[in-house]
Image: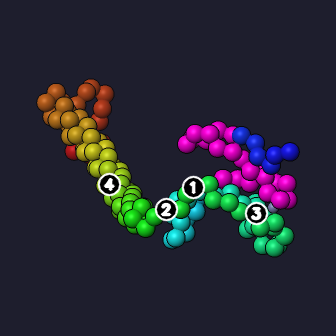
Amino acid sequence: MSDRSSIASGHGHQESRVCFCGLPCPLRTSSSKDNPGRRYVGCPKFKDGTGTHCKFFDWIDDLVNDRTRAMLSELKIKNKLLEDQLRHKEVVESRLYFLLFALYGLCLALSSMLMYVIFGVPQGIDRRKLPF
Ligand SMILES: [Zn+2]
């Protein structure tokens, strides 16, 4: 009997694995310095801190060479920089929308005042109670 069953993934056909405990092993992605982005499977009890895991571990992706690792690291830094720039632009954009809304309100108020100046105060309104 096989300990593998097939599942589909975003990168084609992958196999799900079952560890020696009989538990399905989720596909994980390494974020370590030596293996950034490298996918692996392992016993799901590995990180529960009890030390009862079965030590099943297997890399899914091949070892990344130094040049690719350096490129991945550089891309991560560029991605972080672009995310920071995007966050900054979103803050600026929200401030500009607030300013636009305030200017719109000011234009409405000024146009109302201009209408009163041009056409006068409508009948039935006490002129002494107007702010201008
Ligand atoms: Zn296990």
Closer mark to the observer between disc 3 and disc 4: 3
Residue range corresponding to the magenta coloring: 7-28
Residue 96, percent from left and from top: 29, 50
Spatial CA span between label 2 and label 4: 35 Å
Mark 4 highlights which residue? 89
Q: Looking at the image, tell me whether mark 2 or mark 3 is earlier in sequence order.
A: 3
Residue type at numbered disc 1? Asp
Indicate if the residue with disc 2 has its beta carbon within 8 Å of ligand 1: no
Which numbered disc, 3 or 4, marks the residue that appears first in the sequence? 3
Provide the residue designation for mark 3. Answer: 56
| Disc number lying in front (2 or 4) | 2
Within the magenta stretch, is there residue 80?
no
Pointer 1 residue Cβ closer than 8 Å to ligand 1: no
Position of 35 compared to 22: left or right? left
Can you say whether 24 is above or below 119 in the image?
Answer: below
Q: Note whether ligand 1 is within 8 Å of mark 3.
A: yes
| Image position of 69 (left or right of 48) | left
Q: CA distance from mark 1 to mark 2?
A: 8 Å
- In x, y percent, where is residue 128? 26, 42
Q: Is residue 18 left or right of residue 126?
A: right
Q: Amino acid at mark 4?
A: Lys
Disc 2 target residue: 64
